[in-house]
Image: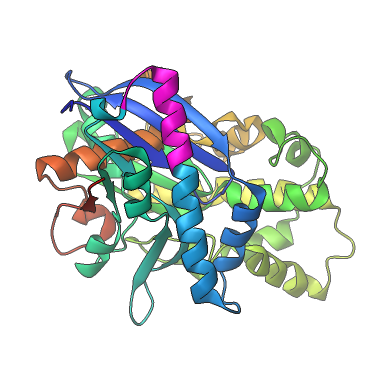
Amino acid sequence: MSEQLYIGLMSGTSMDGLDAVLVDFSGEQPQLLQHYSQALPPHLKAEFQDLCAPGTNELHRLATADRQFAEYSAEVVLALLEQAQLSASAIAAVGSHGQTVRHMPDALTPYTLQLGDPNTLAALTGIAVVADFRRKDIALGGQGAPLVPAFHEALFKTRLAEDCPTAVLNLGGIANITLFAANGGEVTGFDTGPANTLLDLWYQLHHPDAAQSYDPEGSYGASGKVIHELLGAMLADDYIQQAPPKSTGREYFNYNWLMSYLESADGSDSGWRSEDIQATLAEFTAATVAHGLQQASPTPVHSVFVAGGGAFNQHLLGRLAAHYPEAQWRSVAALGVDPQQLEAMAFAWLARQFMLGLPGNMPAVTGASRATVLGGLHLP
Protein backbone atom coordinates (compact mmCIF):
# COMPACT_ATOMS: atom_id res chain seq x y z
CA MET A 1 0.00 0.00 0.00
CA SER A 2 1.33 3.42 -0.92
CA GLU A 3 1.55 6.00 1.82
CA GLN A 4 1.38 8.83 -0.68
CA LEU A 5 -1.53 8.17 -3.06
CA TYR A 6 -4.99 9.24 -1.93
CA ILE A 7 -8.35 9.55 -3.63
CA GLY A 8 -10.72 12.43 -2.86
CA LEU A 9 -14.46 12.32 -3.57
CA MET A 10 -16.67 15.38 -3.66
CA SER A 11 -20.35 15.81 -4.45
CA GLY A 12 -21.37 19.36 -3.67
CA THR A 13 -24.48 21.40 -3.02
CA SER A 14 -25.27 21.62 -6.74
CA MET A 15 -25.74 17.82 -6.79
CA ASP A 16 -24.75 17.66 -10.45
CA GLY A 17 -22.22 14.85 -10.14
CA LEU A 18 -19.36 13.23 -8.25
CA ASP A 19 -15.76 14.34 -8.75
CA ALA A 20 -12.99 11.86 -7.98
CA VAL A 21 -9.30 12.77 -7.95
CA LEU A 22 -6.10 10.81 -7.46
CA VAL A 23 -3.51 12.89 -5.59
CA ASP A 24 0.17 12.18 -4.98
CA PHE A 25 1.48 13.67 -1.74
CA SER A 26 5.09 12.49 -2.09
CA GLY A 27 6.45 15.88 -3.13
CA GLU A 28 6.52 19.30 -1.51
CA GLN A 29 3.16 20.10 -3.09
CA PRO A 30 0.22 17.73 -3.75
CA GLN A 31 0.10 16.65 -7.38
CA LEU A 32 -3.15 15.81 -9.16
CA LEU A 33 -2.47 12.65 -11.16
CA GLN A 34 -5.92 11.77 -12.44
CA HIS A 35 -9.50 12.91 -12.20
CA TYR A 36 -12.81 11.38 -13.16
CA SER A 37 -16.29 12.87 -12.99
CA GLN A 38 -19.66 11.23 -13.41
CA ALA A 39 -23.15 12.71 -13.41
CA LEU A 40 -25.35 11.89 -10.45
CA PRO A 41 -28.09 9.39 -11.40
CA PRO A 42 -31.36 11.33 -11.81
CA HIS A 43 -33.23 9.27 -9.20
CA LEU A 44 -30.52 9.88 -6.60
CA LYS A 45 -30.36 13.59 -7.37
CA ALA A 46 -34.13 13.89 -6.98
CA GLU A 47 -34.08 11.96 -3.71
CA PHE A 48 -31.24 14.03 -2.29
CA GLN A 49 -33.07 17.24 -3.16
CA ASP A 50 -36.21 15.94 -1.44
CA LEU A 51 -34.26 14.87 1.65
CA CYS A 52 -32.97 18.42 2.11
CA ALA A 53 -36.43 19.29 3.46
CA PRO A 54 -38.77 17.47 5.88
CA GLY A 55 -40.92 14.80 4.25
CA THR A 56 -42.61 11.45 4.69
CA ASN A 57 -40.91 8.13 5.46
CA GLU A 58 -37.60 9.94 5.83
CA LEU A 59 -35.74 7.27 7.79
CA HIS A 60 -36.21 4.54 5.18
CA ARG A 61 -35.55 6.88 2.27
CA LEU A 62 -32.42 8.29 3.90
CA ALA A 63 -31.00 4.83 4.68
CA THR A 64 -31.69 3.66 1.13
CA ALA A 65 -30.09 6.72 -0.45
CA ASP A 66 -27.12 6.37 1.92
CA ARG A 67 -26.40 2.86 0.62
CA GLN A 68 -27.16 3.66 -3.03
CA PHE A 69 -24.84 6.66 -3.07
CA ALA A 70 -22.05 4.54 -1.57
CA GLU A 71 -22.52 1.97 -4.33
CA TYR A 72 -22.43 4.74 -6.93
CA SER A 73 -19.30 6.23 -5.29
CA ALA A 74 -17.60 2.84 -5.48
CA GLU A 75 -18.31 2.70 -9.23
CA VAL A 76 -16.67 6.10 -9.63
CA VAL A 77 -13.60 5.09 -7.57
CA LEU A 78 -13.14 1.90 -9.58
CA ALA A 79 -13.49 3.84 -12.85
CA LEU A 80 -10.82 6.29 -11.65
CA LEU A 81 -8.47 3.41 -10.78
CA GLU A 82 -9.04 1.81 -14.18
CA GLN A 83 -8.33 5.12 -15.89
CA ALA A 84 -5.12 5.50 -13.85
CA GLN A 85 -4.19 1.82 -14.40
CA LEU A 86 -3.78 1.24 -10.67
CA SER A 87 -5.01 -1.42 -8.28
CA ALA A 88 -6.79 -0.73 -5.01
CA SER A 89 -3.66 -1.77 -3.10
CA ALA A 90 -1.82 1.30 -4.45
CA ILE A 91 -4.13 3.70 -2.57
CA ALA A 92 -3.59 4.66 1.06
CA ALA A 93 -7.18 5.80 1.59
CA VAL A 94 -10.23 7.39 0.01
CA GLY A 95 -11.44 10.67 1.51
CA SER A 96 -15.20 10.69 0.95
CA HIS A 97 -17.16 13.85 1.68
CA GLY A 98 -20.55 12.24 0.98
CA GLN A 99 -23.65 14.11 -0.09
CA THR A 100 -24.93 16.71 2.36
CA VAL A 101 -28.70 16.57 2.82
CA ARG A 102 -28.99 18.56 6.06
CA HIS A 103 -26.56 21.10 7.49
CA MET A 104 -27.94 22.75 10.63
CA PRO A 105 -24.99 24.10 12.66
CA ASP A 106 -27.12 26.81 14.30
CA ALA A 107 -30.01 24.56 15.36
CA LEU A 108 -30.86 24.14 19.05
CA THR A 109 -29.05 20.82 18.76
CA PRO A 110 -26.52 21.49 15.99
CA TYR A 111 -25.93 18.75 13.42
CA THR A 112 -24.84 18.01 9.88
CA LEU A 113 -25.60 14.94 7.79
CA GLN A 114 -23.74 13.55 4.75
CA LEU A 115 -24.89 10.37 2.98
CA GLY A 116 -22.74 7.68 1.33
CA ASP A 117 -22.13 4.77 3.72
CA PRO A 118 -18.33 4.49 4.06
CA ASN A 119 -18.60 0.84 5.14
CA THR A 120 -20.18 -0.06 1.80
CA LEU A 121 -17.68 2.10 -0.10
CA ALA A 122 -14.72 0.39 1.63
CA ALA A 123 -16.15 -3.09 1.07
CA LEU A 124 -16.83 -2.53 -2.64
CA THR A 125 -13.49 -0.87 -3.45
CA GLY A 126 -11.14 -2.78 -1.15
CA ILE A 127 -9.69 0.56 0.04
CA ALA A 128 -9.73 2.15 3.48
CA VAL A 129 -12.21 5.04 3.59
CA VAL A 130 -12.01 8.16 5.75
CA ALA A 131 -15.39 9.89 6.00
CA ASP A 132 -17.69 11.91 8.29
CA PHE A 133 -15.37 14.92 8.33
CA ARG A 134 -17.76 17.56 9.63
CA ARG A 135 -19.35 16.28 12.83
CA LYS A 136 -16.24 16.41 15.04
CA ASP A 137 -15.92 20.12 14.37
CA ILE A 138 -19.60 20.62 15.29
CA ALA A 139 -19.05 18.57 18.46
CA LEU A 140 -16.41 21.15 19.40
CA GLY A 141 -18.81 24.05 18.90
CA GLY A 142 -17.89 24.79 15.29
CA GLN A 143 -19.91 25.15 12.12
CA GLY A 144 -18.48 22.00 10.54
CA ALA A 145 -17.88 24.12 7.44
CA PRO A 146 -16.23 25.34 5.39
CA LEU A 147 -13.38 22.84 5.62
CA VAL A 148 -11.54 23.73 2.40
CA PRO A 149 -9.75 26.81 3.87
CA ALA A 150 -7.44 24.48 5.83
CA PHE A 151 -6.40 22.83 2.56
CA HIS A 152 -6.10 26.19 0.83
CA GLU A 153 -3.70 27.27 3.58
CA ALA A 154 -1.58 24.13 3.18
CA LEU A 155 -1.56 24.44 -0.61
CA PHE A 156 -1.29 28.17 -1.23
CA LYS A 157 0.03 30.03 1.82
CA THR A 158 3.68 30.14 0.77
CA ARG A 159 2.62 31.30 -2.70
CA LEU A 160 0.27 34.01 -1.41
CA ALA A 161 2.45 35.66 1.25
CA GLU A 162 1.79 39.11 -0.17
CA ASP A 163 1.77 42.52 1.50
CA CYS A 164 -1.98 42.83 0.79
CA PRO A 165 -4.82 40.44 1.68
CA THR A 166 -5.52 37.72 -0.89
CA ALA A 167 -8.50 35.37 -1.19
CA VAL A 168 -9.51 32.07 -2.74
CA LEU A 169 -13.19 31.94 -3.70
CA ASN A 170 -14.96 28.63 -4.30
CA LEU A 171 -18.08 29.02 -6.44
CA GLY A 172 -19.82 25.69 -6.00
CA GLY A 173 -23.45 25.37 -5.01
CA ILE A 174 -22.53 27.63 -2.12
CA ALA A 175 -19.85 30.33 -2.29
CA ASN A 176 -17.12 30.31 0.32
CA ILE A 177 -14.01 32.42 0.73
CA THR A 178 -10.61 31.76 2.22
CA LEU A 179 -8.87 34.97 3.21
CA PHE A 180 -5.09 35.13 3.51
CA ALA A 181 -4.16 38.12 5.65
CA ALA A 182 -1.26 40.29 4.54
CA ASN A 183 2.32 39.12 5.14
CA GLY A 184 1.43 35.58 6.16
CA GLY A 185 -1.11 36.52 8.83
CA GLU A 186 -4.01 34.39 10.06
CA VAL A 187 -6.15 32.58 7.49
CA THR A 188 -9.93 32.91 7.88
CA GLY A 189 -12.98 32.04 5.81
CA PHE A 190 -16.72 31.30 5.70
CA ASP A 191 -19.69 30.68 3.40
CA THR A 192 -20.83 33.98 1.90
CA GLY A 193 -24.14 32.63 0.54
CA PRO A 194 -25.40 30.84 -2.59
CA ALA A 195 -23.39 30.59 -5.79
CA ASN A 196 -24.67 28.06 -8.32
CA THR A 197 -27.46 26.44 -6.33
CA LEU A 198 -30.09 29.12 -7.03
CA LEU A 199 -28.72 29.94 -10.50
CA ASP A 200 -28.92 26.29 -11.55
CA LEU A 201 -32.35 25.85 -9.96
CA TRP A 202 -33.88 28.78 -11.81
CA TYR A 203 -32.19 27.86 -15.11
CA GLN A 204 -33.44 24.26 -14.91
CA LEU A 205 -36.98 25.39 -14.16
CA HIS A 206 -37.04 27.41 -17.39
CA HIS A 207 -34.87 25.12 -19.55
CA PRO A 208 -36.02 21.59 -18.62
CA ASP A 209 -34.89 20.14 -21.95
CA ALA A 210 -31.48 21.84 -22.11
CA ALA A 211 -28.40 19.70 -22.62
CA GLN A 212 -26.80 21.27 -19.55
CA SER A 213 -28.28 21.66 -16.08
CA TYR A 214 -26.64 25.08 -15.74
CA ASP A 215 -26.54 28.41 -17.59
CA PRO A 216 -23.54 28.04 -19.98
CA GLU A 217 -21.14 30.93 -19.33
CA GLY A 218 -24.03 32.79 -17.69
CA SER A 219 -25.47 33.79 -21.08
CA TYR A 220 -29.09 33.48 -19.93
CA GLY A 221 -28.43 35.69 -16.92
CA ALA A 222 -26.55 38.17 -19.11
CA SER A 223 -29.64 38.53 -21.31
CA GLY A 224 -31.74 39.83 -18.40
CA LYS A 225 -31.92 43.01 -16.35
CA VAL A 226 -31.42 43.16 -12.59
CA ILE A 227 -34.61 43.66 -10.55
CA HIS A 228 -33.24 46.03 -7.93
CA GLU A 229 -36.26 45.79 -5.63
CA LEU A 230 -35.87 42.01 -5.47
CA LEU A 231 -32.10 42.25 -5.07
CA GLY A 232 -32.41 44.68 -2.16
CA ALA A 233 -34.83 42.42 -0.34
CA MET A 234 -32.59 39.36 -0.73
CA LEU A 235 -29.49 41.25 0.38
CA ALA A 236 -31.26 42.06 3.67
CA ASP A 237 -31.61 38.31 4.41
CA ASP A 238 -30.58 37.30 7.91
CA TYR A 239 -27.87 34.91 6.75
CA ILE A 240 -26.19 37.49 4.53
CA GLN A 241 -26.11 40.01 7.37
CA GLN A 242 -24.90 37.44 9.94
CA ALA A 243 -21.32 37.85 11.12
CA PRO A 244 -18.91 34.92 10.64
CA PRO A 245 -18.19 32.19 11.53
CA LYS A 246 -21.11 30.96 9.47
CA SER A 247 -21.98 28.24 6.97
CA THR A 248 -25.04 27.33 4.95
CA GLY A 249 -26.44 25.00 2.31
CA ARG A 250 -29.35 23.93 0.14
CA GLU A 251 -31.60 23.39 3.19
CA TYR A 252 -31.59 27.20 3.56
CA PHE A 253 -31.02 28.60 0.06
CA ASN A 254 -33.54 26.59 -1.95
CA TYR A 255 -36.71 26.85 -4.03
CA ASN A 256 -38.87 27.79 -1.06
CA TRP A 257 -36.42 30.53 -0.02
CA LEU A 258 -36.44 31.99 -3.52
CA MET A 259 -40.22 31.80 -3.90
CA SER A 260 -40.73 33.57 -0.58
CA TYR A 261 -38.87 36.58 -1.97
CA LEU A 262 -40.54 36.43 -5.38
CA GLU A 263 -43.99 36.35 -3.77
CA SER A 264 -43.35 39.00 -1.13
CA ALA A 265 -41.68 41.65 -3.30
CA ASP A 266 -44.55 43.99 -4.19
CA GLY A 267 -46.92 41.07 -3.70
CA SER A 268 -46.39 39.67 -7.20
CA ASP A 269 -43.70 38.65 -9.68
CA SER A 270 -46.07 38.62 -12.66
CA GLY A 271 -44.27 41.47 -14.40
CA TRP A 272 -40.80 39.95 -14.17
CA ARG A 273 -39.22 37.98 -16.98
CA SER A 274 -37.46 34.75 -16.04
CA GLU A 275 -34.15 36.01 -17.49
CA ASP A 276 -34.44 39.10 -15.27
CA ILE A 277 -34.71 36.87 -12.21
CA GLN A 278 -31.66 34.90 -13.44
CA ALA A 279 -29.74 38.16 -13.81
CA THR A 280 -30.82 39.21 -10.31
CA LEU A 281 -29.65 35.90 -8.82
CA ALA A 282 -26.23 36.36 -10.44
CA GLU A 283 -26.12 39.90 -9.08
CA PHE A 284 -27.09 38.55 -5.63
CA THR A 285 -24.21 36.07 -5.66
CA ALA A 286 -21.74 38.76 -6.75
CA ALA A 287 -22.98 41.26 -4.17
CA THR A 288 -22.90 38.75 -1.31
CA VAL A 289 -19.35 37.65 -2.19
CA ALA A 290 -18.28 41.31 -2.21
CA HIS A 291 -20.03 41.80 1.14
CA GLY A 292 -18.22 38.74 2.46
CA LEU A 293 -14.85 40.08 1.35
CA GLN A 294 -15.64 43.32 3.18
CA GLN A 295 -16.65 41.37 6.29
CA ALA A 296 -13.46 39.32 6.16
CA SER A 297 -11.00 42.14 5.56
CA PRO A 298 -11.23 45.85 6.38
CA THR A 299 -8.23 46.27 4.09
CA PRO A 300 -8.99 45.84 0.37
CA VAL A 301 -8.28 42.36 -0.96
CA HIS A 302 -5.65 42.55 -3.69
CA SER A 303 -6.30 39.31 -5.59
CA VAL A 304 -9.14 36.76 -5.66
CA PHE A 305 -8.47 33.33 -7.17
CA VAL A 306 -11.68 31.58 -8.23
CA ALA A 307 -12.44 27.84 -8.17
CA GLY A 308 -15.52 25.67 -8.69
CA GLY A 309 -18.01 25.48 -11.53
CA GLY A 310 -18.76 29.18 -11.20
CA ALA A 311 -15.22 29.94 -12.37
CA PHE A 312 -16.52 29.30 -15.91
CA ASN A 313 -19.55 31.60 -15.65
CA GLN A 314 -18.27 34.64 -17.51
CA HIS A 315 -21.30 36.78 -16.66
CA LEU A 316 -20.93 36.05 -12.94
CA LEU A 317 -17.19 36.75 -13.02
CA GLY A 318 -17.89 40.10 -14.63
CA ARG A 319 -20.42 41.01 -11.95
CA LEU A 320 -17.98 39.98 -9.21
CA ALA A 321 -15.36 42.33 -10.64
CA ALA A 322 -17.96 45.10 -10.85
CA HIS A 323 -18.98 44.68 -7.20
CA TYR A 324 -15.41 44.39 -5.92
CA PRO A 325 -13.17 46.30 -8.36
CA GLU A 326 -10.38 46.60 -5.79
CA ALA A 327 -9.26 43.04 -6.56
CA GLN A 328 -7.73 41.30 -9.53
CA TRP A 329 -9.99 38.34 -10.36
CA ARG A 330 -8.27 35.20 -11.68
CA SER A 331 -8.85 31.48 -11.86
CA VAL A 332 -6.92 29.21 -9.47
CA ALA A 333 -5.52 27.78 -12.71
CA ALA A 334 -3.07 30.69 -12.41
CA LEU A 335 -1.77 28.90 -9.30
CA GLY A 336 -1.42 25.61 -11.17
CA VAL A 337 -4.64 23.98 -9.93
CA ASP A 338 -7.68 22.84 -11.93
CA PRO A 339 -10.60 24.97 -10.65
CA GLN A 340 -13.01 22.03 -11.03
CA GLN A 341 -10.86 19.63 -8.96
CA LEU A 342 -9.66 21.78 -6.05
CA GLU A 343 -12.47 20.80 -3.67
CA ALA A 344 -12.11 17.06 -4.32
CA MET A 345 -8.37 17.42 -3.74
CA ALA A 346 -9.18 18.91 -0.34
CA PHE A 347 -10.87 15.69 0.75
CA ALA A 348 -7.91 13.59 -0.38
CA TRP A 349 -5.80 15.91 1.80
CA LEU A 350 -8.23 15.58 4.73
CA ALA A 351 -8.01 11.78 4.48
CA ARG A 352 -4.22 12.05 4.62
CA GLN A 353 -4.43 14.42 7.60
CA PHE A 354 -6.50 11.76 9.40
CA MET A 355 -4.05 8.98 8.56
CA LEU A 356 -1.18 11.12 9.85
CA GLY A 357 -3.10 12.11 13.01
CA LEU A 358 -3.04 15.80 12.06
CA PRO A 359 -5.82 18.42 12.41
CA GLY A 360 -8.12 19.07 9.48
CA ASN A 361 -10.14 22.04 10.74
CA MET A 362 -9.30 25.67 11.44
CA PRO A 363 -10.99 27.16 14.55
CA ALA A 364 -10.58 30.67 13.09
CA VAL A 365 -12.80 29.54 10.20
CA THR A 366 -15.38 27.24 11.79
CA GLY A 367 -15.51 28.62 15.33
CA ALA A 368 -14.59 25.27 16.91
CA SER A 369 -12.98 25.39 20.35
CA ARG A 370 -9.79 23.74 19.08
CA ALA A 371 -8.10 22.18 16.08
CA THR A 372 -8.72 18.45 15.77
CA VAL A 373 -8.34 15.38 13.58
CA LEU A 374 -11.48 15.06 11.45
CA GLY A 375 -13.25 11.94 10.22
CA GLY A 376 -13.41 8.25 10.98
CA LEU A 377 -11.66 5.25 9.42
CA HIS A 378 -13.57 2.41 7.74
CA LEU A 379 -11.50 -0.57 6.69
CA PRO A 380 -12.39 -2.83 3.73
* Residue 352 in picture, x, y percent from top left: 20, 38
Q: Residue at x 22, y 47 (%)?
A: 379
| Res 379 visible | yes
* Residue 303 in picture, x, y percent from top left: 39, 29
Magenta span: helix, strand or loop, mainly?
helix
* Residue 26 in picture, x, y percent from top left: 17, 20
Mark count: 0
Q: Nearer the viewer, residue 85 or 329?
A: 85
| Res 332 visible | no
Q: Is residue 348 above or below residue 374?
A: above
Q: Residue at x 13, y 59 (%)?
A: 370
Image quarter where the N terminus lies is top left
**334 relative to 61 in the view: left or right:** left
Where, by quadrant of the figure, is residue 53 drawn?
bottom right
Asked if residue 35 is among those painted magenta in the image, a careful observer would answer no
- Residue lying at the far left in this picture: please name it: 357
Image quarter where the C terminus lies is top left
Asked if residue 86 is among those painted magenta in the image, a careful observer would answer yes
Q: Which residues are magenta?
A: 74-87
**226 relative to 80 in the view: left or right:** right
Q: Is residue 252 above or below residue 321?
A: below
**337 relative to 351 in the view: left or right:** right
